[in-house]
Image (cartoon, rainbow, N blue to C red):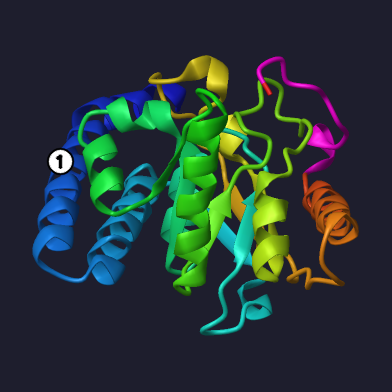
Amino acid sequence: MKYLYRLYQLLLAFPLILIATILTALTVVIGCTIGSGHFWGYYPGKWWAWFVVRILLLPVKVEGRENLVRGQSYVFVSNHQGAFDIFLIYGFLGRNFKWMMKRQLRQVPFVGIACQAAHHIFVDKRGPSKIRQTYEQARKTLKNGMSLVVFPEGARTFTGHMGSFRRGAFMLADELQLPVVPITINGSFNVMPRTRDLRWAIWHPLRLTIHRPIVPIGHGLDNICHAETLSYAAIMSALVPEYQGFKENPDQ
């Protein structure tokens, strides 16, 4: 069955994904240039991510959408299991948002230029001034009523377990007094872990758990620590037993 699935990927899924990626990138760039960035910066990418998951025949279960209020901006924080985190969140979260992503993704063919046109936020850590520019862009995004998705671990796990969180997302939420929504991803590490980038996808069910929003309890360090602690606990609580528990990632 494994080799039959690989043959399916080689002959059908991968060629169609490549075509869809090129068409989506062109649609986003043209749409954001001449039309509404709010629409064209989100929906083509959402459909592309949904298509990638479906063409690879990966089952998806989403839990907790009822926890979100229409029209409310959120800072979503998620564990970072693997490459398919992107497709799962983008295709199945059901909220218009912007990503905070590593600046290296700007160099990915087609994807990078589309993300730039859609005004997703590239995190630049090359010095304090670059970091300040990144967070100023994030502030403007949130102030304009958009939600934001962040992987506070800063990098994909090598083990499937969660590492430590960085505080940037929680500081932004505190500054703008926005709710933080923890998201737990299961299955992405099994489909394509970091150690198997650009290799065969492995068939495995995916699950996206949207936890209840964590509302601000004040302003400042106590609120930041409160949101970070509760988010970490919520995300950890919904991980499958195999990946429960903290393990430090060397590049976090």
Residue 140 or residue 113, whichever sits in front: 140
- Indicate left or right for 171 with 6 as reference: right
Q: Name the dominant secondary structure of the magenta segment.
A: loop
Which x, y percent locates residue 134? 49, 43
Residue 151 appears in the rendering: yes
Dividing the image into 4 quarters, which one contains the C terminus? top right
Magenta highlight range: 240-251
Residue 237 or residue 31, whichever sits in front: 31
Which x, y percent locates residue 97? 45, 63
Q: Residue at x 64, y 80 (%)?
A: 66
Which x, y percent locates residue 75? 62, 61
User: Which corner quadrant of the image does residue 74 belong to?
Assistant: bottom right
Q: Which residue is mark 1?
A: 22
For badge 1, the amino acid type reads: Ile
User: Which corner quadrant of the image does residue 144 belong to?
Assistant: bottom left
How many numbered badges does the structure rendering display?
1
Q: Residue at x 83, y 60 (%)?
A: 220
Q: Is residue 244 above or below residue 119?
A: above
Q: Residue furthest front?
A: 129
- Indicate left or right for 238 with 81 as reference: right
Which x, y percent locates residue 169? 65, 50
Q: Residue at x 32, y 47 (%)?
A: 55
Residue 83 appears in the rendering: no
